[in-house]
Amino acid sequence: MFAPMLVLEVVSQFLGAWLLWSLYRRDQDPPLRFWAIAYTLNGVVSAAVCHQLVWAEIPALTALEGLLSLVSSACLITGALRSLGRSPGRAMLLAPLAVLAWVVLATALELSFFARTMPVLGVAGLGMMGTGVAMARTVGRGAGARITGVGLVLLGLHIMDYPLAVEHPEFLPWGHAVAALLQFLTFTGIVLLSVERASAKLVTQEARYRGLFDDAAVGIFVADATGTLVTVNSTLNRLIGSSTPLEGQPVSSLYVHAPEAASLLYGTAEPLASHAVRWKAADGRELSVQLYARRLPQGAVEGVVVDITQLEHLRQHLDQAQRAELLGQLAAGIAHDINNVLGVVLASGELLRRTGADPAKREELVTSLLAAGTQGAELTRQLLGFSRQRQGQKTPFELGERVQQVAGMLKPSLGSGINLVLEAPPQGCRIEADPTLIEQLVVNLVLNARDAIPENGRIAISVSPEQAAGAHRVKLEVADNGVGMSPDTLKKAFEPFFTTKSHGTGLGLAVVKRAVSQSAGELNVISEPGRGTTFQVRFPMTSANA
């Protein structure tokens, strides 16, 4: 019966060590590491004891058993203390050194087995009992802590009787059987304790991430494959202003135009999509939101919602400010044309008053008056069109023809030292965009080129069709031979409010970039210091009629 009991104890120790190492690799919980080390060392000690009792006693091996037992007990105690949120005290660190000195001395003096082992196992047993009592009495702990505490107390008592049991071989099989049972009891408590700690950790993490989810600065939601909201954070509830939770409501109920929900959230194969949409609050207000949607397995969708209502209002104000700036820059050039018109009107009126009844002369003067009035009316129409606060709808038009009109309006504001070269065919370069937005784009590019030319220079505007990769496009190019831009300046050129000029708001190229984006175009810039700058804008060509 003796041999099976030893084998049972050795197997139980190593099996427990394997399971504890597996739990530690999964959970990375520090107490599990100490417990796994302890059970590994216990297995080694049990195997050494088996060798000593079955074959022959070796004093050095006996000393090693004592040291390993002490280290194993220290690891069990450290793991238990770590699970309680405590650290080993100084006494626990000094005790192994004192015991080690005693083991070396006792072995050298060839003292009895009892004298060699009792101090070692006594220190280990008392330490395990004290830690077990602390664990069993800890308030708020679960069954795992109590079972582990009881197991440590009983195991500490049992290992201290081992030097006595050796003197009575008939009790050894039962002693090893009891040791195996107590090791199993302690192991069971440790496993339960690790599960309880892992569960508590998950609850804490869930509460933390739930707090981050609810307190996020943006709205977050998850909708199932049917378009029903299943999870909504507090920020989104506050944004909508709903008195009841939004869970259970269809996503489409948030949209000003409900059909947009299906096409924007489920009508695309893209894994991540961004949309600027119009939502409605609970009180009926319209909200401008930027929606970032991501497809989940089984057709569900999660989305992040950013309220850009105030940003849209600010953008409108910036547009108005930028338009006012451009109008101010154009005023000097247009004032010259207005003065010319008024000069013709006043001169012709004065001549009419002085002219007699010569019909031919009167007809010539009246024609001059009408031509001047027509020119003034055209200038007024262009200014009114440019100063509109809201952009119009996209409509097909000839880009070359529109660029010709804008260039004619801009030419007086460029000054006599700048030569404007225009190559824009009136037909064959049809695009679909907001005409007012494109006019603003051209004005910004030309005035930006004018400001880049110190004194005398050249601005070339060209419009041409092109074909690449089977796609028909229209290219608008504005090039100047001014000072050019460095790579660092080029990186920041399209940032709002960035400018290298002593005047202006720095909004011109930012407006250009936005206009290109809203027109589904592509923007490319080529520039080097001292060699000028070329802006190339490409728009999709259309054959649609206005």
Image: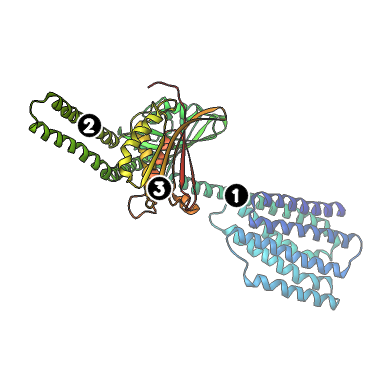
Question: Where is the C terminus found, in terms of image quarters?
Answer: top left
Where is residue 270? Give x, y as percent. 54, 32
Where is residue 440? Give x, y as percent. 35, 38
Query: Is 468 in front, or is 185?
Result: 468
Q: Is residue 79 visible?
A: yes
Q: Is residue 234 visible?
A: no
Where is residue 382? Give x, y as percent. 28, 34
- Amino acid type, residue under disc 1 in the picture: Ala
Per the image, the residue denoted by label 3 is: 457
Where is residue 530? Give x, y as percent. 47, 53
Per the image, the residue denoted by label 1 is: 198
Query: Is 386 in front, or is 55?
Result: 386
Gap between marks 2 and 1, in whole Å? 80 Å
Gap between marks 3 and 2, in whole Å? 31 Å
Q: Is residue 525 left or right of residue 282?
A: right
Q: Is residue 285 left or right of residue 115?
A: left
**Can you say whether 250 is above or below 147 in the image?**
above
Tell me where residue 332 sits by quadrant: top left
Gap between marks 3 and 1, in whole Å? 74 Å
Per the image, the residue denoted by label 2 is: 377
Lower position in the chain sequence, tag 3 or tag 1:
1
- Amino acid type, residue under disc 3 in the picture: Gly
Dot 2: what SS? Answer: helix
Q: Is residue 176 left or right of residue 126?
A: right
Marks 3,1: beta carbons within 8 A: no
**Can you say whether 217 is above or below 47 in the image?**
above
